[in-house]
Image (cartoon, rainbow, N blue to C red):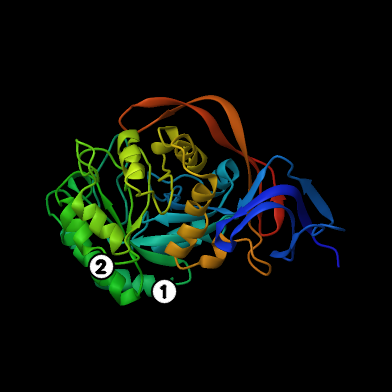
Amino acid sequence: MSHDLAILGGRIIDPANGRDGFADIAFKDGKVAAIGAGAGDGAVETVRADGLIVTPGLIDLHTHIYWGGTSLGVDPDAYMGQTGCTTLVDAGSAGPANFHGFRRHIVEPAKSRILAYINASFAGIFAFSPAVMVGESGDIRLLNPGEVVRVGREHLDIVVGVKVRVGLVASGGIGVAPLDIAIEAAEALGLPVMAHLDHPPPSRLEVLSRLRPGDVLTHCYRPFPAAPTTADGRVRDEVMAAKAKGVIFDIGHGKGSFSWQVAETMLAAGLPPDCISSDVHTMSALGPAFDQLVTMSKFLHLGQELSDIVRAVTDAPARAVGRPELGALTVGGPADATLLRIQEGAFPLTDASGVTVEARRRFGLAGYVREGVWRRPGEH
């Protein structure tokens, strides 16, 4: 039986299945059909992957892709073509009031696979731009857990959790109340919370002490204030406690949430991120995050093992959203894969504090497979 597509001769790195080695992989009828020597014999279409890394389809756990419906949304399919991220998780762009529109106008017509955290705020992230910045969690009247549960239940096939943004920017001075409301809604839905913290209030301790095992702390390497580390290079006690109890640490780079100094301290303390994500939106897409590949390249520069980086953009985020099959290349599983090359040169990489380093290596996209169809960079 011939296969539809085969990727030949690449180094397959699939941490979920413990695979790291050179092999062929074939796809048929939107599924992985075979992996191993000769797996691609007789395939209708073949792609040579000599010198390339083949991974499960990359997952970006923190994106904002409600294009046209919010001021911060980028086009999901264009972003997939740019990065090879075949699964995009929207981090709360839409709330109960506009989630139906997000589904109808973005999720359903998209060629990329889209999952979403529903925002705890009724209006979602409605005013996020260089000109107008109003935190959606600042008005307690917009935080109705009953509406989050009602709409979340209607869309449980794509809703993977409840997103809440707290901090001086996102929630004004009302403290930790939005997080408590979000957790109440998430418990009713049987789903995790993804929590954003910008400038206090609330404090790190108030947020981290409330998060449950399986909840996600995004912006986990953010700079001062609300950094996980102290000025003298120590990891804060509440951060260690949250990690120990099973809170998932996600990068969520964005415009202001990644620090070289914090990253070096956390990695030296044995606290790598569980998930690497871009927090791409209309402002961060202009820098310093740019996209998922740039964010991944920063961890390559920091010396993380290649397999650990791949795990943080495949298996780990897939498990965080309760879709483990999306983070693996398994026979019978989804036919999504990403082909990467490691480029050598001199590449400036900048953090949220404006500190720039010169990296010698970075990730580049060589192409990707979405539902068994081969696509070159930029295609979708």
Mark 1 — residue? 154
| Residue at 45% across, 50% down | 65
State whether residue 168 is above or below residue 193. above
Q: In this rendered view, identify the residue nearer to me: 375 or 144.
A: 375
Horizontal relation, residue 277 to residue 336: left or right: left
Label 2 sits on a secondary structure element that is: helix
Disc nearer the start of the sequence (1/2): 1
Q: In this rendered view, identify the residue nearer to me: 19 or 358.
A: 19
Q: Where is residue 289 in the image (x, y as percent from the top left)?
A: 42, 37
* Residue 137 is at least partly visible in this image: no
- Type of amino acid under label 2: Ile
State whether residue 365 is above or below residue 146. above
Label 1 sits on a secondary structure element that is: helix
Mark 2 — residue? 183
| Residue at 57% across, 58% down | 109
Badge nearest the viewer, 1 or 2: 2
Horizontal relation, residue 156 to residue 181: left or right: right
Q: Position of residue 368 (x, y in %)?
A: 65, 48
Q: Dot 1: within a 10 Å radius of its alpha carbon, few (fewer than 14), some, or many (20 or more) residues?
A: few
Q: In this rendered view, identify the residue nearer to me: 266 or 139.
A: 266
- Type of amino acid under label 1: Glu
